[in-house]
Amino acid sequence: MADGWLKMLQVREINFSYAEPVLKDISFDVSGGELLAVIGPNGSGKSTLLKIIIRALSPASGAVSLDGRNIASLSRRDVARLMGYVAQQSTVRFPLTAMEFVLQGRFAQGRMVGFESETDVRQAAWAMEVTETSEFACRLIGELSGGERQRAVLARAIASRPRLLVLDEPVANLDISHQVKMLDLVKRLTAEGEMSALVVTHELNLAAEFATHVLMLKSGEMRGFGSPGEVLTESRLSDLFDADLLVDVNPVSGAPRITLTAKKRERGSGGAGERGSRGAGEP
Ligand code: ADP
């Protein structure tokens, strides 16, 4: 199989500035079926990176390719079709039913609600089925609970059968059970390999459980990239967030388990240890 096929998303030496540099030499790959969690403190450039990947922003230098094609050369319609984006806060201004809302995800195919084709309806119905939103297809989106609405937002994002699903803090307002369900769903959607996902999240334990890879960002720089077991170590996480974090192994899943500790970390004398963490070598 050609390398270009395996590497569904290629991010190469991305630099971006507003007034100050926000992203510095960011390079990584995401293959089919992978779920990449992007973690880092507030203001580290996570949302900006996502906006560059969905082409809402243009980098000062560097390139993003999807399936071997530079996204700068794609039509707007192709970008919308190939990438499903869930923004940090999805506001719905119009009184749409969940079905109409999910059908909006088919607009990228060039039609409007009321002019949808049989394929549009079939694909929207598929998206609602896999996200378990069919049961409230006829209810107004504004009247759904947070968890239900977030699943409908995901349904809209996958209705165009994108190659890449890009989610900016998709579980931020959900209770713990709905957070797990949401990430589990994204994981199942990507597991077959036709779609990959990039998820910005502050939920480190969910990233540890569900992500195949983790990208660490701080001050616009990459501070780590690898499997959760490789990068979610005590020293790296404590440095990333400037907080005292304990990492051991989740006894059920075997994934790293991150716990916040109130104890002041001793700096300069070995810093945080790697107690219990399964960390591999630093880059
Ligand atoms: P994160 O998602 O990790 O919180 P962002 O990508 O939102 O980080 O922001 C990275 C940096 O860019 C921050 O310092 C932020 O203040 C700055 N920034 C974000 N958006 C803008 C903007 N529209 N104009 C100017 N600066 C911005």
Image: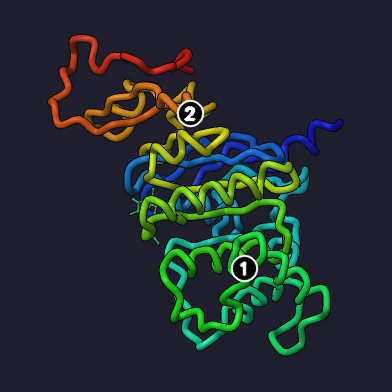
Q: Residues within 10 Å of mark 1 (few under 14, many from 20)?
A: many
Up/down of 61 relative to 276, above or below? below
- Toward which corner of the image does residue 202 lie, by quadrant? top left
Which kind of residue does numbered mark 2 sit on?
Ser
Q: Which residue bears the numbered disc 1?
A: 156
**Foreground tag (2 vs 1):** 2
Q: Where, quadrant-wise, is the N terminus in this rendering? A: top right
Q: Is mark 2 within 8 Å of ligand 1?
A: no
| Colour convention of the picture | rainbow
- Toward which corner of the image does residue 268 lie, by quadrant? top left
Q: Which mark is residue 110?
A: none
- Residue 5, horizontal then vertical, whole percent: 80, 38
Q: Which residue occupies the extreme right position in the image? A: 1
Q: Residues within 10 Å of mark 2 (few under 14, many from 20)?
A: few
- Residue at x 32%, y 21% (from the top left corner): 235
- Residue at x 25%, y 18% (from the top left corner): 272
- Residue 83, horizontal then vertical, whole percent: 66, 58
Up/down of 281 relative to 20, above or below? above
Which quadrant of the render holds ligand 1? bottom left
Which kind of residue does numbered mark 1 sit on?
Arg
Taking the image as shown, residue 266 lies to the left or right of residue 166, namely left
- Residue 98, horizontal then vertical, whole percent: 57, 78
Up/down of 111 relative to 255, above or below? below
Q: Cα distance, mark 2 to mark 1?
A: 31 Å
Q: Which residue occupies the extreme top position in the image? A: 269
- Residue 195, horizontal then vertical, whole percent: 70, 48
Q: Nearer the viewer, residue 214 or 55?
A: 214
Which one is earlier in the sequence, the residue at label 2 or at label 1? 1
Under tag 2, what secondary structure?
Answer: loop
Q: Which residue bears the numbered disc 2?
A: 253
